[in-house]
Image (cartoon, grey):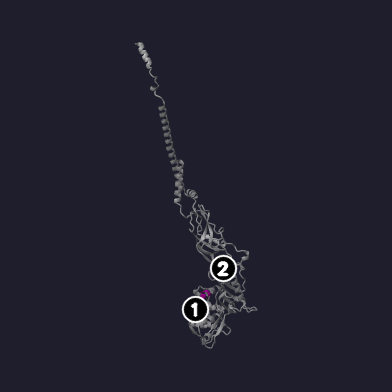
Amino acid sequence: MARRAVASALALALALASAGAPRVAWAQDGVEPVAVAADAPAEAPGGAPAEAPAAEDSPAYSADEPPALSSPAALLVDRDTGYVLFEQGADEQRTPASITKILTALVVLENASLDDVVTVEEGDFEHVTPESTTAGLKAGDVLTVRDLLAGLLLPSGNDAAYVLARAVGGDWQTFVGMMNEKAASLGCTSTHFSDPCGLAEDNHYTTARDLVTIFEAAMAYPAFQEIAGSSSWEMPATGENPARTITTTDLLLDPESPVYMGDVVVAGKTGFTYDAGKCLIVAAEKDGMRLVAVILGGSDEEDADGVTPNYYDMRSLLEWGFGAWETGEVVSAGDVIASAEVTLSSDGDEVGVLSDDAILATFPRGTTIADLTVEPSWDGAFQAPLEKGDSLGEAAVSLDGRALGTVRVSAESAMELSLVDYAVWWVSSDPVHMGIVAGVVAAVFVVIGLVAAAASRRRRRREQFTIAVGERRAMAATPSPQRLKPPEDKGAQKRGGKHFK
């Protein structure tokens, strides 16, 4: 009975402790944060461990070894993430030459319809110098805005620039004001243009970084991308001009050029003056990755194939960008990105930290989850029980000090509560709990004492009863004194009687 009473009391204490246990709780204060960065398991999407690429699979390009360029200013940016892969003098103010025409095209696209018809006027040629590039326009030509944009972007026609500026702005000076307003609205704080074609040298400047911003705004128009990505364009017969084919000045788009990049280049624009040097801006795509690159201030010295260094710089920059980098989900939903400490669990001391979100980023090829640094939003350890999918909070993910994003995270698996460990923790975690247990233990001993006393009394009563019963039985078995009296000698009485008679 005493043993049953003790077991019942302990079971009652454990039941009371478990009833107050939260399903997810923080560990005690003072526990160090979970070290998820250094010891985090490297896993690929779907929970499979991520493996470092074999030596033979290593990329031909390294993100740590960008190409050496001859041009003084350059910028390479991933178009989807905005991450800058390479920059060199990207914020230096420079004359962009005919790359100016990208902003000219953007303002035209925002303020005119592609099918609008424009008549070329004699005054449109006033500021077109004899040595500058033209689209071969003549006064009286009647062309659509679409065809004039082709004449602006492919052969880099200064004549087309002034025709479009006058048609949209009323005069080219007003149009240039519209250009500068547009640049400012895009956030280009280091840009100011003085004409619509890029021949001006005074107060006409921009930076490689601003040019990328302007180019991206223009690329939002499918017509711009179509025209700027064409190697040639069929111009209709009009006025004194017969039907003719105009071609691009961008050798990367020219199938006959030794630097032709096939379908990789989707749009581009060239520029050159003696003051600006050789300039080039390009949008390129390969295997789902989209890049934009700018080269400014290159030498105009041609090699035996008639190619200037800016094209080689651009090709090297793009090939390195596509070869050394990739853009995609550096973390996918369902990836185990770290581990978190768990206390009081019968299933171990750690649980996998599962990402509930994806992070799109540009990162060096071959990067695995093991290369990432994961900083949790929680401080300390979690307390069992945990269910699979329970929210753990958030985690900030970075790579080599560069923040990539923040994801919500959850428990990869369930972590059951150990009742024994919880009981010990519950008792020791609070003096009040210790008092409760002490009271329960004291009550148990009181109950034990009462039970023992009652048992002792019952035992004494049984012993007394047993003695009494024995005595009664003994008494019953002993003869009475009357039964021990010898029998009467009736014969003697008779004899005596006769004698006395």
Q: Which mark is residue 30?
A: none
Which secondary structure lies at badge 2? strand
Residue found at x 37% / y 13%:
495
Near mark 1 (Cα within 10 A), the count class, few <14, some 14-19 or many ≥20, is: some
x and y percentages locating residue 274 in the rendered image: 60, 79
Residue assigned mark 1 = 109
Say if 34 sits above or below 489 in the image. Answer: below
Residue assigned mark 2 = 326
Say if 255 sits above or below 480 in the image. Answer: below
x and y percentages locating residue 228 in the rendered image: 54, 78
Residue type at mark 1 is Leu
Q: 83 or 455, which is in the foreground?
A: 455
Q: Kindly indicate the quadrant of the structure image that contains residue 328.
A: bottom right
Q: 86 or 195, which is in the foreground?
A: 86
Near mark 2 (Cα within 10 A), the count class, few <14, some 14-19 or many ≥20, is: many
Q: 455 or 221, which is in the foreground?
A: 455
Provide the residue span drawn in magenta: 215-219
x and y percentages locating residue 348 in the rendered image: 53, 53
Which secondary structure dominates the residues rendered in magenta?
helix
Q: Looking at the image, which residue sits at the far bottom?
A: 240
Q: Is residue 36 magenta?
A: no
Quadrant where the N terminus sits is: top left
Residue type at mark 2 is Glu
Q: Looking at the image, which residue sits at the far right?
A: 304
